[in-house]
Amino acid sequence: MTGKRTTGSQAGRHAYEGLDRAIHEKARLGIMTCLLTHKDDLTFGDIKELCALTDGNLSRHLKVLEDEKLVEVEKGYEGKKPKTLCRLSKEGRKRFLDYLEELGNVVKDASVEKVLREEGSKKSGNSSWAPA
Amino acid sequence: MTGKRTTGSQAGRHAYEGLDRAIHEKARLGIMTCLLTHKDDLTFGDIKELCALTDGNLSRHLKVLEDEKLVEVEKGYEGKKPKTLCRLSKEGRKRFLDYLEELGNVVKDASVEKVLREEGSKKSGNSSWAPA
C-alpha cells in the first residue's frame, strides 16, 4: 500500500511488450509491411521506392532485419546487373503477425471513435457529464 | 524509365510519414495512450505503473513529450509530498489522433486476416497456385 491512485490490476496495462523493437522502428515497419503484402520477393529497388528510403537507410534497416532473422536477403545478378531479392523469413512472418496483433491492441485501447464521441458530447455542454 | 518492377503510383506507399517519431517510440506510445484514455490527469506514479517503466525511463520520455509540446507536466505538492500531474496538451491530443489514423492505415495495409486466409489456401495444396 503506497497510496497509488490506479488499481493494481491495471499495472502494465499500457506497456505493450508485444511491440517488438526490431519491427516497431518506423522505416522497418514499412519494410515489413510491404514484404508481407507482396506475394513475390521484392528487389532492393522496389522496397526503396515503396518505402521512400535512401540506399543507405534501406541497407542499414535491412541489415537489422536480417540480423534478427526476420528477413532473408539474397544477393545475385540479373545478367551483369546486381540484383538483391528480399522476403520475410518464416520466423519473420510469425513475429510480424504477433506484432500486428499488439498494434491492434494499441488502436483498440486508444479507441479513437469513442474519444471523438466524448469530445463531441463535451462540446454540447458540461451538463451532460453530471451524474444521473 | 529505369526498369523498376513496381508501378510508379505505389511510390512511398509504405513510407507512413504520419508515424510521428516523437510519439511512435514504444514507451512514449504507451504514455500517450494512457493519457488519452484517462479523462483525469495522471500522476507520475500512475503512468509509471500503467506503462511498467522505471523512474529514469519515464522521466526521460516525459521530457521528450514535454519538449515536443505534446504533454503538459505540472509539478506541485500534495501536503509535503511532491506530486507531478501529467495530461495531453490540446496539440498533443490532435497530433496523437492523427498518428492513430496512420497507425490504422498500417494495420489495414497489413490486413492480417487476408494474409492468414492466404496462408490457409497455401496449406491446402500447391496445385491451387498453378496458373489457370
Image (cartoon, coloured by chain):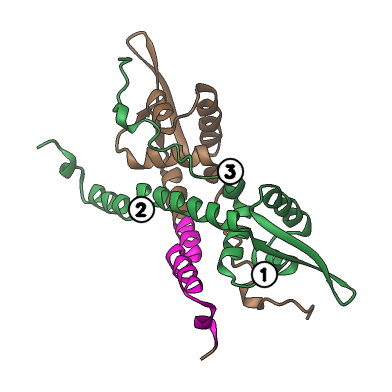
Chain colours: A brown, B green
Q: Look at the numbered disc 2 and give the secondary structure of its residue.
A: helix
What chain letter is assigned to the residue under label 1?
B
Residue highlighted by disc 1: B41
Number of the label disc, if any, that sits on residue B21: 3
Residue A96 against residue B33 in the figure, above or below: above
Name the kind of residue labelled 2 in the image: Val
- Asked if marks 1 and 2 touch (Cβ < 8 Å), the reply is no
Q: CA distance from mark 1 to mark 2?
A: 35 Å
Give the residue at the far top of this rendering.
A80
Name the kind of residue labelled 1 in the image: Asp
What chain letter is assigned to the residue under label 2?
B
- Highlighted range, magenta: A101-130
What chain letter is assigned to the residue under label 3?
B
| Quadrant placement of the N terminus of chain B | top left
Q: Residue at x 59, y 55 (%)?
A: B92
Number of the label disc, if any, that sits on residue B112: 2
Q: CA distance from mark 2 to mark 3?
A: 24 Å
Q: Earlier in the sequence, mark 2 or mark 3?
A: 3
Q: How would you classify the magenta stretch by its main secondary structure?
A: helix
- Asked if marks 3 and 1 touch (Cβ < 8 Å), the reply is no
Give the residue at the far front of this rendering.
A125
Q: Tell me if mark 2 has few (under 14), some (14-19) or many (20+) residues whose alpha carbon lies within 10 angstroms of its own.
A: some
Q: Tell me residue B39's x, y (percent).
A: 59, 72
